[in-house]
Image: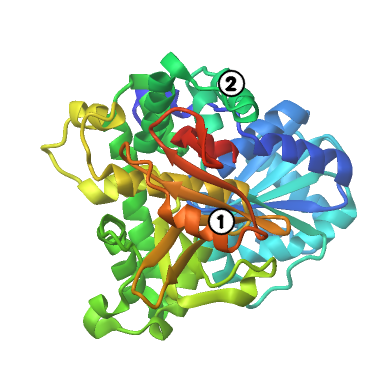
Amino acid sequence: MEPQKQELNKIFFERKISAKLLEWKKRSDGRTCLLIEGARRIGKTTVADEFGRLYYKSHIIVNFSTDGGVLKVFEDSQNSLGDLFDGLSVYYSTPLYKRDSLIVFDEIQCYPKAREQLKALVQDHSFDYIETGSLISLKQNIASIVIPSEEESIQMGPMDFEEFLWATGDRTTIPFLRDHLLSLKPLNSLLTVINRKVRTYMVVGGMPQSVVQYVSSKSYLSSEGEKNQILSLYRNDIAKFAGGYAARAMAVFDSVPAMLSHHDKKIVFSSFGDIGNRSSQFQDTLFWLSESRMMHLVYRLESFDPLAGFSLDYDKVKCYMSYTGLLLTLAVGASDHLSNSLFKSIALGKLGANEGMMAENLACQMLSMNHEKVFFFEKLLPNKTKYEVDFVCSDGEKFNLYEIKSGRSNAAASLSYASSIYKKKINKCYILGSFDVKVTDGIIFLPLAFASIL
C-alpha cells in the first residue's frame, strides 16, 4: 500500500452511530453482542475500530474476510474459551482485560461459526463483542447456524449530509437550517452558499472513502475513482450473491439513470425484454436489491391511509440509488476524458447533468434516512388529468407531501389537488428546490438541503 494511501485511511470522520454504540455499551453491560449491518464500504469497520480505541482499555479487530490465519485459532480452541482468548491475544499481540476489552468480529458472514459461538462468549461475560457484516451476504450464510438470541442489530448507512459537513469542518450549517425551518425566514444571501454545499454532497456522496479523497485533495475526480471501485464491487456482488435474480438485478441496476431521466420515472418492466416484462417477474429481484441497500424502492400509495402498507400498488414502483453520489458515477461512467472541472461545474450548478434526476434521488436518500418508508402518490382522473406527488412520508396519523423541482418552477398543481381532496389526511406540503424559503398558499418552499432535516 502506498504511504499516501495509508495516511488517507487513517482519517476518521465522526459518525452519529457512535453515540448509539455507546448507549448499547452502557445499557447492555456485556449481556448482548451487537451486529452492525449495512451495505459495502460505508465505514462499519472504521466505526467499530474507533469505538474500541476510545471506550476500552484494549480491542481486537478479527477480520474474517482477509485474515484466513485467524480461522485456525478458532478451530484449535473449539472446546475452550480460555484457549480462544489466549490465541486471539497472542495472534494480534494485544492483551485482553476482563470487562474492559472489545472484540470485533469483522465481516462475520465470512465465518458463520463465530457468529453461532457468540452465545457462549456473551454468557462468559469476559469481554464485549461487536460484529460487522454486509447485508448483501449476511442472509446468505445463516442456513446452517443458530443465530444467538443475545444478538442485537443496528442498521448503518452512508454519511448523511450533516456528517459530510462535519467532515469538511462545518458544524454551523445544519443548526442554521433547523432555525430557519422553525422560523421560515428566507436565507437571502446565504441561499447560494447552502445550495453549493448540498450540490457538493450530491456529487461526492456519503461513502467514507470518497469523502476522504475529496476532503484530502479537494478533487472531485479523486472521489470518482473511489466510487467507480464501489460500483464494481456492487456489480460483482450481484453476480455472486443474486443467484437466479442476477440478470434482472443487473439490468435494473444499470438502468436506474435512464429510468430517472424519464419524466415518468417508474420502472417500465416491458423494456427488459427477454429477461422479464411483467412486474410479477421482478418482485423478488427488487426486494433483493432493496435488502442489499443498493437501492431505495418507492411504491405508489393508492390512498392516504395510516396503515399505508395495505394501500400500495406493487405494479408501480420507482427505483432510486441508495447513495446519490454513486448515481452520478453510474450515469457518467468511467472515462479518461472526465475532468475535475466537469464535476466542479455540476457541483456549482453550472451544468444541468440532468439535475432533476440528481435532486430527486438526493431527496429520496435524505428522506429515507429520516423515515421508515417513503412512497409516491399518483392519481389519474377520468378526464385523463394526472396528478403525481414525488414523495409521501407518514407523520403519525397524517402525511407530509414533497415535490422536487430542479429549476425555478414553483408549479404545485399536484400538491394543491392532493391537499384539497385529502385535506384531513395531509399535515404539510413542501416544494424542495434551489429557491429560497417562503410560504405560498399553505405550501412551504425550501432549498433542497432542508430534506436532510424533514
Identity of the residue drawn at 89% across and 56% down: 123
Secondary structure beneath disc 2?
Answer: helix
Task: Judge whether 386 appears above or below 42 on screen.
Answer: below
Task: Judge whether 178 appears above or below 360 on screen.
Answer: above
Q: Quadrant of the N terminus?
A: top left
| Residue 7 appears left or right of 20 | left
**Residue 44, how many percent across, how many down?**
58, 44
What type is the residue that disc 2 sits on? Answer: Phe
**Residue 164, how many percent across, how many down?**
50, 30
Q: Quadrant of the C terminus?
A: top right
Q: Residues within 10 Å of mark 2 (few under 14, many from 20)?
A: few
Q: Which mark is residue 7?
A: none
Q: Which mark is residue 176?
A: 2
Q: Residue furthest left?
A: 337
Identity of the residue drawn at 33% across and 60% down: 235
**Residue 294, how many percent across, how many down?**
44, 57
Using the image as rendered, state which of residue 401 and residue 322 is in the foreground: 401
**Residue 250, how many percent across, how many down?**
32, 68
Identity of the residue drawn at 59% across and 55% down: 393
| Residue 107 appears left or right of 147 | left
Using the image as rendered, state which of residue 240 and residue 216 is in the foreground: 216
Task: Judge whether 440 appears above or below 244 on screen.
Answer: above
Tag 1 residue = 419
What type is the residue that disc 1 sits on? Answer: Ser
Identity of the residue drawn at 29% across and 29% down: 220
Task: Judge whether 310 appears above or below 265 on screen.
Answer: below
